[in-house]
Image (cartoon, helix red, strand yellow):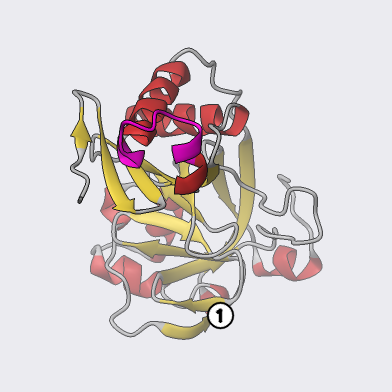
Amino acid sequence: MKSSPYQTNSFTILPVSETAVTVQFLDEHTEQIHEKVKELSLILDKYPFVGMTEYVPGFTSVTVYYDPFIVRKNNHASVSTFDSIKELLEVKVTQGKEVPLPETKLVRLPVVYGGEYGPDLNEVADYNGSTEQDVIQKHCSVTYLVYMIGFAPGFPYLGGMDQRIATPRKKTPRMSVPAGSVGIAGSQTGVYSLTTPGGWQIIGRTPKPLFQLQEEQPSLLQMGDRVQFYPLSVEEYEKGAFPDD
């Protein structure tokens, strides 16, 4: 029998498959909703329920994966697996409200803007009726929130960008975007952690590696961190000299 969504005033639990459900908070990209996502993620980290295999946080939701046979075995045999998961996650959401969020980490990223490192800076400026220097100033004037890591390992989706530099994705994606490339797609900005195909408007590049597989914590940024960009000259970039690092 197909499971129906379970909804409260603050979240909805949606069946995704026989091995996954999504806890969907209000569909708004706000810091308040982000905190709810982070609270639930922390609880699932600290106190996973028996049968849970992993979870994936998103902008406004957390998708939870589980082994239905283990969940079934460890919960009421008289209710469906979905109902068991629903009850377990209701408790986890409540627990999350009682857990203090960890102190926010601020990461400053130097960026060389424009030229060969930011080939779309002029396009972003033209689209917004602005200048390249104005785009750089606006891009560096905000402290961004890391809403989630996705697309590629270590790739941060950053919220808080000045909407006066928002620009649509490229109509034809590039086959290869270098690691460290800083891009704009619509109303958000992000940094390519690995060299991959991509359609974001590339306005610059940071020399700081965002993903290093050999490290104990491969991803430089985590959900909930804050990011500030600051401009770097081509000479500083090529010499490896980062004055505000």
Q: Residue lying at the far top in this picture: please name it.
A: 98
Where is residue 139 drawn, in percent x and y? 43, 51
Look at the image and tell me whether residue 198 can be seen: yes
Is 77 one of the magenta-colored residues? Answer: yes
Does residue 138 appear to the left or right of 104 in the view shown?
A: left
Q: Which residue is mark 1?
A: 116
- Residue 56 visible to an observer of this rendering: no
Residue 202: image x %, image y %?
46, 71
Q: Tell me where the magenta segment starts and ends, as one range.
A: 71-82
Residue at image position (25%, 69%) is 127
Residue depicted at 80% across the width and 54% down the height: 215
95 left or right of 14 in image: right
Q: Which residue appears farthest toward the front when viewing the image?
A: 78
Which residue is located at x 23 percent, y 64 percent? 129
Q: Where residue 145 appears, x then y in whole percent?
A: 46, 39
- 195 vs 36: above or below: below
Q: Residue 189 lies in what quarter of the image?
A: bottom left
Please state which of residues 72 and 12 is positioned toward the viewer in this rendering. 72
> In the image, what residue type sits under mark 1?
Glu
Neighbour tally class for label 1: few under 14, some 14-19, many 20 plus, Cα within 10 Å? few
Residue 84 horizontal/vertical position (percent): 37, 32
Q: Where, by quadrant of the figure, is residue 227 drawn?
A: top right
Whether 8 is drawn above or below 157: the answer is above
Camera-side residue of 195 and 24: 24
128 displayed left or right of 200: left
Please state if 170 lies on the left or on the right of 75 as rendered: left
101 above or below 65? Answer: above
- Total number of numbered discs in the rendering: 1
**Residue 62 counted in the magenta span:** no
Q: Secondary structure at mark 1?
A: helix
